[in-house]
Amino acid sequence: MTITQPDLSVFETLESEVRSYCRGWPTVFDRARGSRMYDEDGHEYLDFFAGAGSLNYGHNNPVLKRALLDYLERDGVTHGLDMSTTAKRSFLQTFQDLVLRPRDLPYKVMFPGPTGTNAVESALKLARKVKGREAIVSFTNAFHGMSLGSLAVTGNAFKRAGAGIPLVHGTPMPFDHYLDGRVPDFLWFERLLEDQGSGLNKPAAVIVETVQGEGGINVARTEWLRALAELCERQDMLLIVDDIQMGCGRTGAFFSFEEAGVVPDIVTVSKSISGYGLPMALCLFKPELDLWEPGEHNGTFRGNNPAFVTATAALETYWADGSAMEKQTRARGEQVEQALIAITEENLADVKEYRGRGLVWGLEFHDKGRAERIARRAFELGLLIETSGPESEVVKLLPALTITPDELDEGLRVLARAVRETV
């Protein structure tokens, strides 16, 4: 692909140095539809990024777009704080009928604010309120958000350093596979809990991702997750599952914890819950935990009605028959896995490991700088992929769940070429 030099001057002179994704993709995007994006010069890119998982149903999904346009054209309420609106009622009823009841989940629904870190902050605050304890346990290589409470339970040293102050009341424990199976699961954690001299304050809750996305596509085994849930129950700690990136069908089932057969006390959901890339987040929790006083946790944009509209359309379109959506995602995932096996066999000395579930996959190399070079070459070839892991050492594949088999195959061929053409 021949790419003319785009005019990035206003971004480089006016926008803050904090910008990041645009540095890896130095062009100016103009349009997007499905799994393809187009820059202002008309160059086409296949998207294996999907808005960091906020576009599970692709860009400008026509069904969701039609619902949104109809709502706006009739002057539907766009901003309403936490007022009762027809859009919110429709979402709540649909979410209950298509997601909660079929899974026998009793959760109350809270709208904490429009982003993932808002949901995490509300979950931590609620856990501390319910248990009357301040400590939270998280896991190595976790990522839960960029506000102070979320950073305190995030593992990445670079992101934590940005806080500028001590991050307290969070204690990390080894995630699954962190010690390469040399130590029985939770031996250290439970020993600390039971030893009055350990220095670990009794935690209010444990927060975990079933698949660590930003941490390097680290996949927890179902037996590990079940053992964690049992430990939390035994030790009177709440279990919080952060499903912000891995929920809404990313791993197959609507919630990523379903396969393990656990029922978390609190679940955080964001990214693709609106389905259209509109800001929206949920904090779900068991009814007995609903101890909030009215207005005790607040936020001006917690009632994003356009997002309720597209979320409802997404649930009705893709989750009225959840088994079909799950089956399709797993089939696409198998297609990715076969391609990664082929890449591994071709580059046996260089590939350290491939891993994933559903439609989230990672490819790790022994050379920690290789992933970024591959992502850069893939961009030149018309494929958008990002990296993850504490040193950006993992190539991260996060295509839309609605991607076609042909599009997926096309992108995987480009990935294989990018691997082949980098050293």
Image (cartoon, helix red, strand yellow):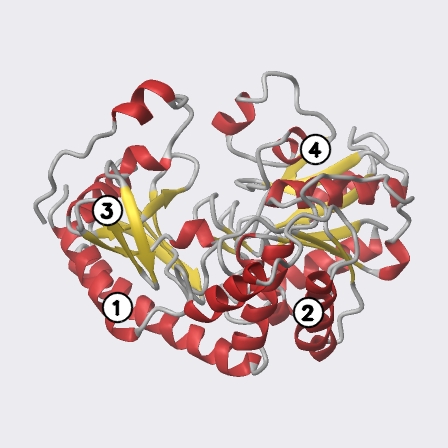
Looking at the picture, how far across and down is residue 231, in whole percent? Answer: 76, 55
- Asked whether residue 289 is in view, the answer is yes
**Residue identified by numbered label 2:** 95
Looking at the picture, does residue 54 appear above or below residue 333? above
Q: Which of 303 and 126 is in front in this view?
A: 303
Give the residue displayed 29% in from the left and 74% down from the top. Answer: 405
Is the C-beta separation of discs 1 and 3 under 8 Å?
Answer: no
- The quadrant holding residue 228 is bottom right
Q: Is mark 4 on a helix, strand or loop?
A: strand
Contact between marks 2 and 4 (CB within 8 A): the answer is no
- Mark 1 and mark 3: Cα distance apart in space: 19 Å
Q: Residues within 10 Å of mark 1 (few under 14, many from 20)?
A: some
> What percent of the width, then of the height, locates residue 369?
26, 35
Say if 407 sits above or below 188 in the image. below
Amino acid found under the numbered disc labelled 4: Gly
Q: At which x and y percent is residue 347?
A: 18, 54
Residue bearing the label numbered 3: 39
Upstream in sequence: badge 3 or badge 2: 3
Disc number for residue 170: 4
Residue denoted by label 1: 407
